[in-house]
Amino acid sequence: MYSLVVLASLLLPGIANAQYTMVKEYIGEHFFDDWSFYNNFDNLTNGDAFFVSASDASKDKLAFVNNAGNAIMQVDNFTNVDFNTKRNSIRITSNDQYTVGSLWIADIMHVPYGCSVWPAWWASAPNWPDGGEIDTLEGVNQVTMSHMALHTSPGCMQSNTSVETSKLVNTTDCSTAVNNNEGCTVTNPGPTYGPEFAAGGGGVFVTEFAAKGISIWYFNRTNIPKSIQGNASSVDTSTLGTPVANWASDGCKITEFFEPQQLVFDITLCGDFAGNDAIFQQTCSGICYEDFVLGPPSYYDTAYFEVSYVRVYGLPGELTVIGSGAPRSADIVGMLSLLVGVVAALLLTW
Ligand SMILES: *[C@@H]1O[C@H](CO)[C@@H](O)[C@H](O)[C@H]1NC(C)=O
Ligand SMILES: *[C@@H]1O[C@H](CO)[C@@H](O)[C@H](O)[C@H]1NC(C)=O
Ligand SMILES: *[C@@H]1O[C@H](CO)[C@@H](O)[C@H](O)[C@H]1NC(C)=O
Ligand SMILES: *[C@@H]1O[C@H](CO)[C@@H](O)[C@H](O)[C@H]1NC(C)=O
Ligand SMILES: *[C@@H]1O[C@H](CO)[C@@H](O)[C@H](O)[C@H]1NC(C)=O
Ligand SMILES: *[C@@H]1O[C@H](CO)[C@@H](O)[C@H](O)[C@H]1NC(C)=O
């Protein structure tokens, strides 16, 4: 019975069941070391946010590492904003790009929420929409469930062979050219956004970017699998169970629609999604910009990410990291740490 189940999952078209090795870690006081801060107003989604520079983020404490060692990224909640001005916020993009054959894990304790707030934890190719976008966590205003999505050029669909636990499939065409660029969206059931998510201590999101398909797992604080607890140097996705969302390659040829991805955290305000009046009125009332962005700064006291770590893994032996420096493979990283270990051991014995 057990072996039949294992066999069946091995044969599933969209599930990679692969083993990955750590290639990059964003954590603790070094969390912000290898990201670029946008330093421009939101000219991408028409949001009422200005994404500050690294130096302003640090000076105004909009991006910092707290006493618990977690990264905080937040909307300005201390400035009265004048009409026709945007409120300061954060958008950071990883300097490294990660190829097909990568997996990233984010341990998130708190996501930004509240009327007008639109955060996301996602990834995209540098020349968006060419090269695709993978959204692991996105929510708006006062919804209680976040959603996951792919956005691509035309021709990528979520096929009915995709194997996932969520029953909340919103749309299956990933093309940015249809459905007002909603992408192929799957809702993450349960408290996966807002105050209840935070009250439960948040959870861990695993995103697998594999040739056989893209998969996302979500584990709340109490059900994180042993295999990814602590500082796991490798991850075997066959230990994670069925993903909450999956896009199998038979409906969307991953290697054709996706190019190397850069990781992104951002929080915008209002704009095309949160500020769309029909969406806004579902969980809030009033006028997004006038009543909230221009309103009391304390509306934004809950508009922050608290992230314990982001770790990226790659298929062993493959060049999965396109760095700001030279390409790196898991083997090279492994060899470097071995070398460091050998040198350390030599120094110790010496
Ligand atoms: C947004 O602003 C940045 C920085 O000025 C610029 O490089 C980029 O081309 C702009 N993007 C769009 C879509 O206007
Ligand atoms: C799955 O999709 C294929 C191709 O689009 C279609 O022929 C088939 O009927 C679908 N199966 C189910 C169960 O919907
Ligand atoms: C997706 O569907 C769920 C469940 O029906 C719904 O609650 C949610 O609002 C929908 N999300 C979007 C972005 O349309
Ligand atoms: C975590 O998920 C499990 C089941 O998946 C559920 O029983 C439990 O109540 C959840 N815990 C929190 C803190 O949400
Ligand atoms: C986690 O493990 C990796 C190697 O597997 C190591 O390079 C890194 O320093 C560790 N991180 C922490 C925070 O201990
Ligand atoms: C802004 O929000 C943060 C997070 O909730 C909070 O710690 C801080 O005290 C708030 N700042 C002000 C000026 O109220």
Image (cartoon, helix red, strand yellow):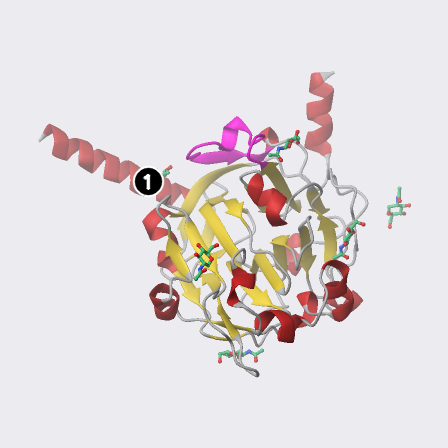
Q: Nearer the viewer, residue 322 or 184?
A: 184
Q: Residue at x 33, y 50 (%)?
A: 29
Q: Residue furthest bottom?
A: 84
Pick whichever, 198 or 158, lies toward us. Answer: 198
For label 1, count other residues whose C-alpha is less than 10 Å away and answer few (under 14), some (14-19) or many (20+). Answer: few
Specify the quarter for ligand 4: top right
> Does any portion of residue 325 appear in the rendered image?
yes
> What span is colored magenta in the figure?
220-237
Percent coordinates x, y for residue 189 in the rendering: 71, 42
Residue that badge 1 annotates: 335
Q: Is residue 294 above or below residue 247?
A: below
Q: Quadrant of residue 220?
A: top right
Q: Is residue 182 left or right of residue 300?
A: right
Residue at image x 73%, y 70%?
276
The quadrant the C terminus occupies is top left
Q: Is residue 235 magenta?
A: yes
Determine the residue positioned at 36% across, 39% down: 334
Would residue 185 be found to the left or right of residue 192 on screen? right
- From the viewer's perspective, tell me whether residue 222 is left or right of residue 279: left
Instruction: Say which amino acid is labelled 1.
Output: Met
